[in-house]
Image (cartoon, rainbow, N blue to C red):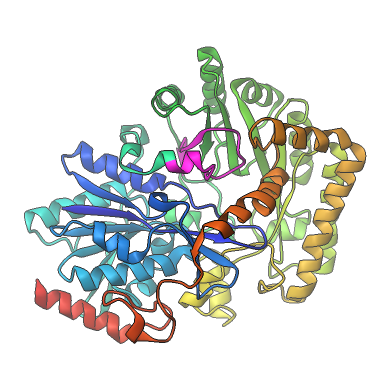
């Protein structure tokens, strides 16, 4: 018996959230692949099962937990479960997975506990040595997890399965990497029926802006670039694969009718790489006249854009996306290996602004090489974009993601301590308390630069085009909260959604009382104080039980 668990969500009560708790498209794909090969499973969506259950998180200031408790998760796991699978896409959610995995180990000492996703792939040894996880599935997960399941079900040795990491007699073991699947169209469509998709849709909790009833979709896998701040290469290698455009539109049509959605949010790392396939996708979608919209919330590359593609995407229903130059400084662009030309980027912006698409831009400040000079260059670019008519800007503070080149370098320098507290700090990218990794700029000054950049962009934008802002607010209040721009998303978070969260906060104190183990449930523990030795002991207990 297999149980797959999506952890609870994290919500920030201040600042701007790094990630939105969303339905796990990774687990939906894993589940579909299991079913295709004859394996049933139990799905537990800890966030989606109780989205109006919000409680304060004792270990993280100004942060809420969304969803059912760990105890309630345990109660939903069938007694006959042999394999429990978790995913952890963002390291800020690691403490939640950490706690649940430990609780599962205590309740099910003989079960094989498996972790997949970016976090485990980036930090396999750390994740195994500090927790109750038995196996890490590294990288693309469908075939590796299926092989694990098949071997466990057959009673065979799984230790040589490609693409995994595990501990053996207290030592870290890692098998050879599994090759990427090149025919990604062979994978079945995500098994959304097993998860709480409708709850996320109804609560407007899908990544990106709210454009009505929308659901996640994946059009490609991987990214061909190797930016120093990104962990993509560690997870996916540098091979980029896009799905067949016709099959992708087939999925959109099917799910539009099945789940009554009017829009889709692409969860791709970068969607606009293969210009030929992108145009085919846009023309196919336009020809079918499905009456749907879509958005690309992740940073979009500018190299593939020409005028034909820009207008084709707009006509096909693309409503909102953002370019990601990251910096206006050539020095920083070289340091982060961004491989873009500012002149070409500005030309791409000029082209897309001819359409009716809402276009934003992602900027990152506070890289180790950043100085006042490089930040001034980024500020100049931001001002220029505002005058050109760009709709949105997102300025975030650099955070070293586990698995990225920057993370490895900063860890070697002793500037990062790999522990659960450092993982939990990666939750908000607009806060005066965030650590600065720049060698010459303090956290306080970096916060000033972020604020100043936002003010420059939006004041200039409003002065040049005041009607645009007024129009967006009019649409928001007259069309059921439709967010035409990212600043409308922030407005809705600050003044509407967070008010609801405070009302839903039925448990002001987290269900476990910090520092007093006598007040904890028998299967619970404090993930921020659990010693490694206890994890080692649990491993031996499991071995003895089996």
Tally of numbered discs: 0
Q: Above or below — where is 516 with respect to 290?
A: below
* Residue 184, image quadrant: top left
Inspect this view and state whether residue 428 appears. yes
Residue 10 shown left or right of residue 496 in the figure: left
Residue 358 shown left or right of residue 418 in the figure: right
Which residue lies at the image location 65% right of the left edge and 24% below the top edge?
314
Which residue lies at the image location 69% right of the left edge and 52% below the top edge?
495
Q: Above or below — where is 97 with respect to 487?
A: below
Percent coordinates x, y for residue 477 in the rendering: 71, 35
Which residue lies at the image location 37% right of the left edge and 63% below the top edge?
69
* Residue 451, image quadrant: bottom right
Percent coordinates x, y for residue 304 in the rendering: 63, 33
Percent coordinates x, y for residue 376 in the rendering: 85, 60
- The magenta segment: 199-221
* Residue 254, image quadrant: top left
Residue 137 belongs to magenta span: no
Residue 354 shown left or right of residue 151 in the figure: right
Which residue lies at the image location 25% right of the left edge and 64% below the top edge?
113
Inspect this view and state whether residue 114 appears. no
- The quadrant in which the C terminus is found is bottom left
Q: Above or below — where is 440 with respect to 517?
A: above
Percent coordinates x, y for residue 286 in the rendering: 56, 16
Residue 208 belongs to magenta span: yes
Taking the view exactly as shown, the residue that stands out farthest to the right is 463
Asked whether 407 or 421 is in front, the reply is 421
Residue 348 shown left or right of residue 524 in the figure: right
């Amino acid at each position: 018996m297999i149980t797959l668990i999506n952890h609870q969500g994290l919500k920030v009560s201040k600042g701007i959230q790094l990630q939105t708790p969303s339905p796990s498209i990774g687990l939906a794909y894993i589940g579909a692949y299991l079913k295709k090969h004859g394996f049933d499973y139990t799905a537990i969506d800890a966030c989606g099962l109780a989205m109006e259950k919000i409680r304060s998180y004792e270990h993280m200031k100004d942060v809420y937990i969304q969803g059912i408790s760990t105890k309630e998760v345990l109660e939903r796991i069938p007694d006959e479960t042999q394999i429990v699978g978790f995913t952890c896409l963002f390291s800020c959610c690691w403490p939640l997975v950490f706690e649940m995995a430990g609780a599962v180990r205590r309740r099910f000492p003989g079960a094989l506990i498996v972790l997949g996703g970016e976090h485990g792939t980036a930090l396999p040894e750390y994740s195994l040595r500090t927790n109750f996880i038995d196996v890490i599935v590294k990288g693309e997960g469908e075939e590796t997890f299926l092989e694990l399941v098949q071997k466990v079900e057959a009673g065979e040795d799984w230790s040589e399965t490609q693409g995994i990491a595990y501990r053996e007699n207290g030592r870290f073991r890692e098998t050879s990497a599994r090759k990427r699947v090149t025919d990604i169209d062979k994978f079945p469509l995500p098994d959304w029926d097993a998860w709480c998709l409708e709850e996320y849709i109804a609560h407007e909790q899908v990544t990106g802006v709210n454009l009505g009833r929308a659901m996640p979709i994946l059009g490609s896998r991987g990214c061909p670039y190797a930016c120093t701040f990104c962990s993509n290469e560690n997870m996916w290698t540098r091979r980029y694969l896009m799905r067949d455009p016709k099959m992708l539109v087939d999925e959109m049509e099917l799910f539009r009718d099945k789940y009554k959605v009017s829009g889709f949010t692409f969860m791709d790392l970068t969607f606009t790489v293969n210009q030929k396939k992108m145009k085919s996708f846009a023309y196919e979608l336009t020809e079918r006249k499905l009456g749907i919209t879509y958005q690309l919330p992740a940073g979009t590359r500018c190299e593939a854009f020409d005028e034909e593609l820009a207008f084709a995407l707009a006509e096909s229903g693309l409503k909102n996306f953002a370019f990601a130059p990251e910096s206006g400084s050539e020095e920083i662009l070289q340091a982060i290996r961004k491989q873009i030309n500012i002149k070409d980027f500005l030309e791409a912006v000029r082209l897309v602004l001819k359409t009716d698409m809402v276009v934003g831009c992602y900027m990152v400040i506070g890289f180790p090489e950043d100085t006042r000079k490089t930040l001034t260059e980024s500020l100049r670019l931001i001002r220029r974009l505002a005058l050109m008519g760009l709709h949105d800007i997102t300025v975030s503070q650099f955070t070293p993601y586990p698995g990225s080149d920057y993370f490895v370098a900063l860890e070697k320098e002793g500037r990062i301590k790999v522990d659960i507290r450092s993982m939990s700090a990666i939750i908000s990218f607009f806060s005066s308390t965030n650590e600065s990794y720049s060698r010459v700029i303090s956290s306080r000054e970096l916060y000033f630069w972020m604020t100043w950049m936002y003010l420059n962009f939006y004041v200039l934008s409003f002065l040049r085009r005041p009607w645009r802002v007024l129009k967006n607010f009019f649409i928001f209040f007259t069309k059921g909260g439709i967010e035409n721009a990212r600043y409308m998303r922030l407005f809705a978070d600050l003044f509407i959604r967070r008010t609801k969260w405070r009302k839903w906060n039925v448990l002001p104190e987290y269900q476990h009382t910090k520092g007093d183990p006598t007040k904890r449930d028998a299967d619970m523990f404090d993930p921020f104080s659990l010693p490694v030795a206890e994890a080692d002991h649990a491993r031996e207990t499991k071995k003895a039980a089996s």
